[in-house]
Amino acid sequence: MANTWTDLLSIDDTFEGEVVRVDTVNKNLAIYNVGGNVFCTDNVCTHGNALLSDGFLEGHEIECPFHQGRFDVRDGRVTCEPATKAMKTYPIKVEEGRVFIDLTV
Ligand code: FES
């Protein structure tokens, strides 16, 4: 079976309670560190042309900087309007200090 994991960044480049932007060849991603657990969503808000990596992370919720829509970073679901469409999320694994993402989902 093909290896579907892409090496994204070092766990040391994520910070507890913060979101960072990571660009791959064709993806703009937001990486969240919540209590030492890492989550990943697309970075561009489903409601408009805002980057969630510029937003405010509180617990498992990311608040969009444009209209304060909110999403749960664990599953991408909307937790506060005006956003109505869920964010896409990606499987993550951490091995030997590196964060890997499965972009094939
Ligand atoms: S652009 Fe994100 S809530 Fe409107």
Image (tube, rainbow, N blue to C red):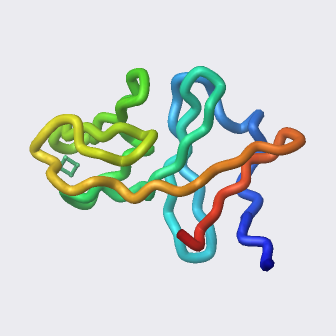
- Which of the 4 image quarters holds residue 75? top left
Residue drawn at x 62%, y 31% as measured from the top left: 37
In-image side of 31 versus 98 (left or right): left
**Compared with residue 42, is residue 35 higher up or lower down, i.e. above or below?**
above
Total marks drawn?
A: 0
Please provide percent x and percent y for residue 15: 63, 28
In-image side of 99 versus 84 (left or right): right
- Which of the 4 image quarters holds residue 39? top right
Outermost residue on the left side: it is 82
Name the one closer to the observer, 51 or 94.
94
Residue drawn at x 62%, y 67% as measured from the top left: 24
**Compared with residue 90, is residue 94 higher up or lower down, i.e. above or below?**
above
Outermost residue on the right side: it is 96
Please provide percent x and percent y for residue 9: 74, 50
Name the one closer to the observer, 44 or 88.
88
Please provide percent x and percent y for residue 80: 17, 36
Position of the N terminus, as image quadrant, is: bottom right
Residue drawn at x 51%, y 37% as measured from the top left: 19
Please provide percent x and percent y for residue 36: 65, 25
Name the one closer to the observer, 23 or 105.
105
- Which of the 4 image quarters holds residue 67? top left
In-image side of 63 versus 37 (left or right): left
In-image side of 9 versus 84 (left or right): right
**Compared with residue 16, is residue 53 higher up or lower down, i.e. above or below?**
below
